[in-house]
Image: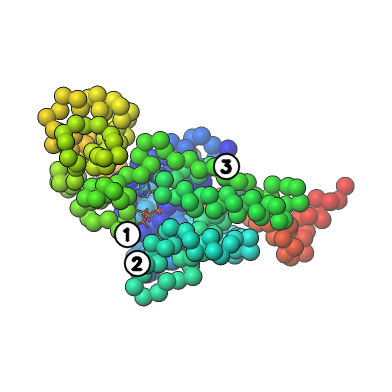
Amino acid sequence: MRIFSGIQPTGTKHLGNYIGAIQQFVTHQDRGEALYCIVDLHAITVAYDPRELRRSVYDLTALLIAAGLDPARCMLFRQSGVPQHAELCWLLCSVTELGRLQRMHQFRDKSVAQRELVSAGLLVYPVLQAADVLAYRAHEVPVGEDQREHLELMRDVARRFNQRFGDGEEVLVVPEHRIPEIGARIMDLQDPTRKMSTTSSSVEGTVYVLDEPDAISKKFRRAVTDSGSEIVRSPEKPGVSNLIEILAVARQVSPEQVEADMASARGYGDLKVATAEAVSEMLAPVRERYVELRADEQRLEAILREGAQRAIEIAADTLADVRDVMGLGPGAKRRERSVP
Ligand code: AQP
């Protein structure tokens, strides 16, 4: 079993990233061969500062290790450190439908938000994402709910590639997504009808993994809740439902258990206080370890480099097969195979 996921080095990671993705990365590193990639090539599809990007890669590397990723038990690397991602992206463009890319929600939302330039990279982003996963013939991809559409495209690209070039063989593995049952879509505390997001949420509505307990407490205290006073999940209560899910994850219990525990609460205020305390407790050790890890950039670089070297070995093998079946290069691998 091979597991792959990518995460962007943009901004400071928030509670949605932590619960929807990072916690799953940590759990899955012992379920198989796990590869986690800091996707700096994705980050350049919108306006960015090159110096800031380099720093953000180290910030995120330290954060992921602080959260529990162990470079001895997984491969942690920079996307731009493995040239096969960009090469496979180009090759997969030949089996990707343009209209589908233009209809992707993320492209539509993000292209509207760009002030200066809507780059072609933003349109091709999901193909690069497909290449990230397919280069390793990964079986599973742990992600949050917002990535469902991209995962579907990736699966279709793999299928179409196999049909077009596979000659009956599964050259590329069609991966499955792994979306957590609870916390797959953490909502903005100020507008619980929208997901907590790096680019479109307000600071007040977003809890950052590195927030101090005081800031966490303030943000939950001011969280927008709903009419009524009953602490139960329901579509009419997006704010309360969000807090229940967050508290369930932070306490490592079910949402039903949280509802039962909160049955005698005096109101939403108690739920907010309990959630803030549990989240602070969950994030405090990550914040402490982060400070220590972030100070040693050389060690972080060595971890990323070693991860990339190991990743290249796997990706190079896939690319050799892909080039071969696509008729690119002298076709050495195929000749080897056909020799009796
Ligand atoms: N609100 C969320 N709830 C649960 N999971 C979430 N993810 C993102 N938001 C939520 C998951 O986090 C992983 C990393 O996403 P990314 O690499 O796209 O990082 P990001 O750009 O920082 O994430 P955002 O906040 O999703 O950014 P924008 O503002 O660009 O939309 C993914 O697995 C994602 O599902």
Q: Amino acid at mark 3?
A: His
Tell me whether circle 3 and circle 2 mark residues in contact (CB < 8 Å): no
**Dots 2, 1 in contact, CB < 8 A:** yes
Decide which of tag 1 and tag 3 comes sooner along the chain: 3
Q: Nearer the viewer, residue 230 or 173?
A: 230
Measuring from the top left, give residue 216's x and y in whole percent: 19, 45
Q: Residue furthest right?
A: 340
Q: Which mark is residue 105?
A: none
Between marks 1 and 3, how big is the CA–CA gap? 30 Å
Q: Nearer the viewer, residue 82 or 121?
A: 121
Kindly identify which numbered label has been placed on residue 199: 1
Q: Quadrant of residue 239?
A: top left
Q: Which of the two discs, 2 and 1, labels the residue nearer the N terminus?
A: 2
174 left or right, relative to 261 = right
Image side of residue 184 versus residue 220, left or right: right
The answer to whether mark 1 is within 8 Å of ligand 1 is yes
Q: What residue is at 29 percent from the left and 48 percent from the top?
A: 193
Residue 126 is left or right of residue 232, and the answer is right
Point 45% across, 71% down: residue: 119
User: Residue 25's spot in the image, x, y percent?
Assistant: 43, 42
Kindly identify which residue carries mark 2: 113
User: Dividing the image into 4 quarters, which one contains the N terminus?
Assistant: top right
Look at label 1 and name its amino acid.
Thr
The answer to which image quadrant residue 185 occupies is top left
Q: Residue at x 37, y 67 (%)?
A: 112
For mark 3, give the secondary structure.
Answer: loop
Q: Which mark is residue 139?
A: 3
47 relative position to 155: left or right: left
Q: Which element carries disc 2, helix, strand or loop?
A: helix
Q: Position of residue 249 (x, y in %)?
A: 32, 34
How far apart are the alpha carbons under marks 2 and 1?
9 Å
